Image (spheres, rainbow, N blue to C red):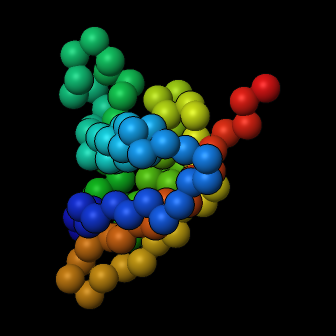
Amino acid sequence: MTLNDSIKIVSLDDISATELRQIDVRLRTLLHCTETTIPGSRAFGLPGDAMDLPVNLAANQIAVELQEKADIYVPEVRIDSVETEYGTDGKLVLTINVRRRDVR
């Protein structure tokens, strides 16, 4: 199983293009990094063991970990949901729905 490298942000209201690019880069980096691989920030990234699980379990683990890590590393957005599709080519396609976090 491999992750599809396509991330598409549909819309985030009241956000500048610069902020949108920064959020995109941080979410993309978070998805593609494995925990313990970045010196000085060993907790950054997702656990690599999800890729060895059956597809349905892997999708669930990735969604849970992404929500927890986004709270720390992309605090201005909240992950609303993570939808998965399983391609016939063995790729897991994630659709990540985010919402701007209320700042109070």
Residue 55 point in image, percent of width and height:
38, 70
Q: Which image quadrant for residue 85?
A: bottom left
Tell me if 70 is positioned left or right of 35 in this view. Answer: right
Nearer to me, 65 or 80:
80
- Whether residue 27 is visible, yes or no, is no
- Of the 4 image quadrants, the one containing the N terminus is bottom left
Q: Which image quadrant for residue 75?
A: top right
- The residue lying at 33 percent from left, 70 percent from top is 92
Residue 97 point in image, percent of width and height:
55, 60
Against 41, residue 54 (above or below) is below
Nearer to me, 12 or 88:
12
- Whether residue 70 is visible, yes or no, is yes
- The residue lying at 26 percent from left, 73 percent from top is 91
- The residue lying at 58 percent from left, 34 percent from top is 76
Q: Residue furthest top?
A: 40
Nearer to me, 89 or 74:
74
Tell me if 23 is positioned left or right of 14 in this view. Answer: left
Tell me if 84 is positioned left or right of 71 in this view. Answer: left
- The residue lying at 39 percent from left, 39 percent from top is 18
Q: Residue furthest bottom?
A: 88
- Of the 4 image quadrants, the one containing the C terminus is top right
Q: How many marks?
A: 0
Q: Residue furthest right?
A: 104
Against 39, residue 31 (above or below) is below
Residue 15 point in image, percent of width and height:
55, 44
Nearer to me, 56 or 8:
8
